[in-house]
Image: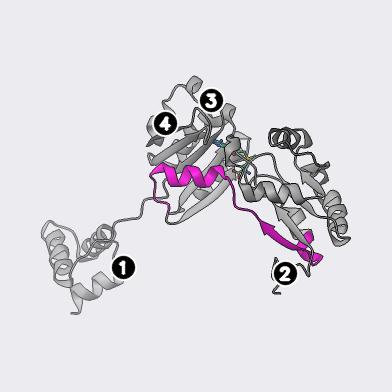
């Protein structure tokens, strides 16, 4: 289904990201859209009221968060269909990214309401691009399970991912989480982005082993963890002639031809049948 967002023939729900700590990151476009709204649905009315007060804006607010997301979304979408201009904001950063909003978007689309998101702050992307870890391909995981055993199971499912991994974590769990990551992922490059966009913004770029040794008392505030993906196995370039002579070398050392072929296959990661064929047939 195709529909142009700004041709005014269809109702529109705006998602408006909010600052992740630095109020100067509220864009002029975001402020214009907020000022034009009849109602602001938000994760926490007290947080959004504070933000609006800073910009001298007064608007009616309604809470839409995890516990009432479906029922309140249905009400809001009906009101948008009746002609009201309603926007959604979560407490910090992008709605829907480890924050409520996804159900509202889904219900909007199901009911023929267009959805448009204003560009704005997001902790994961700031951390990724500042980390120095390869940003070409990345996997955003958000929060891990708070229960240690489940967290470890979750990390195990991510251990083979080659993409750079991005996690959100609460300050009181950061130490244990880094320890579990070191245990499951091994000593990979990693970076903690702390207090991003705020006065005490800090990037700790190191390896999981060294991050695991950091003093917990220095890890305060909000944090994102960026971890290098599983290092790719190095491909060995080897000619058929070299395969043949490697097998012969092992045979001369006393291995059977079968064991020599197996060892060369393991060592070079070249299929055993191919090594067999090169040695015996060609
Ligand atoms: N919706 C937000 C976004 O787009 O980034 C994320 C909200 S999530 C509930 C909150 C988590 O995001 C925090 O626990 C932390 O991991 C991360 N976070 C948010 N603000 C941050 C900041 N200023 N510095 C570092 N991490 C931050």
Ligand 1 contact, mark 2 (Cβ < 8 Å): no
The residue to which callout 1 is attached is: 271
Q: Earlier in the sequence, mark 2 or mark 1?
A: 2
Asked if marks 2 and 3 touch (Cβ < 8 Å), the reply is no
In whole angstroms, how far apart are the C-alphas of marks 4 and 3? 14 Å
Q: Which mark is residue 7?
A: 2
Mark in the foreground, 1 or 3: 3
The residue to which callout 4 is attached is: 211
Asked if marks 4 and 1 touch (Cβ < 8 Å), the reply is no
Magenta run includes residue 102: no
Mark in the foreground, 4 or 1: 4
| Residue 241: percent from left, percent from top | 14, 71
Label 4 crowd (10 A; few <14 / some 14-19 / many >=20): many
Secondary structure at numbered mark 4: helix
Q: Earlier in the sequence, mark 2 or mark 3?
A: 2
Asked if marks 2 and 1 touch (Cβ < 8 Å), the reply is no
Task: Out of 30 and 151, give the one closest to the viewer.
Answer: 30
| Residue 88: percent from left, percent from top | 74, 49
Left or right? Give the position of 32 relative to 269.
right
The residue to which callout 3 is attached is: 220
Q: Quadrant of the N terminus?
A: bottom right
């Amino acid at each position: 289904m195709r529909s142009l967002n700004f041709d005014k023939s269809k109702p529109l729900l705006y998602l408006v990201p909010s600052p992740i700590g630095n109020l100067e990151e509220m864009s002029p476009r975001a402020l214009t859209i907020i000022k034009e709204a009849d109602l602001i649905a938000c994760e926490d009315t007290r947080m959004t009221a504070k933000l609006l007060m800073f910009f001298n804006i007064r608007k009616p607010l309604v809470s839409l968060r995890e516990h009432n997301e479906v029922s309140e979304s249905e009400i809001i979408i009906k009101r948008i269909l009746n002609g009201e201009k309603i926007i959604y904001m979560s407490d910090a950063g992008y709605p829907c990214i480890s924050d409520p909003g996804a159900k509202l978007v889904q219900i909007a689309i199901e009911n023929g309401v267009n959805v448009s998101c204003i560009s704005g702050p997001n902790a994961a992307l700031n951390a990724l691009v500042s980390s120095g870890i390869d940003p070409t391909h990345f996997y955003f995981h958000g929060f891990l399970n708070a229960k240690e055993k489940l967290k470890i199971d979750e990390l195990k499912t991510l251990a083979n991912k080659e993409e750079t991994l991005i996690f959100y974590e609460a300050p009181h769990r950061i130490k244990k989480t880094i320890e579990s990551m070191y245990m499951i992922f091994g000593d990979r490059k990693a970076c903690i982005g702390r207090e991003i966009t705020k006065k005490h913004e800090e990037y700790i770029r190191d390896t999981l082993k060294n991050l695991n040794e950091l003093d917990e008392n220095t890890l305060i505030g909000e944090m994102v963890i960026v971890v290098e993906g599983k290092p790719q196995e190095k491909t060995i370039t080897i000619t058929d002639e070299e395969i043949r002579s490697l097998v012969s070398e092992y045979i001369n050392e006393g291995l059977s031809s079968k064991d020599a072929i197996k060892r060369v296959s393991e060592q070079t990661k070249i299929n055993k049948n191919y090594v067999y064929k090169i040695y015996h047939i060609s």
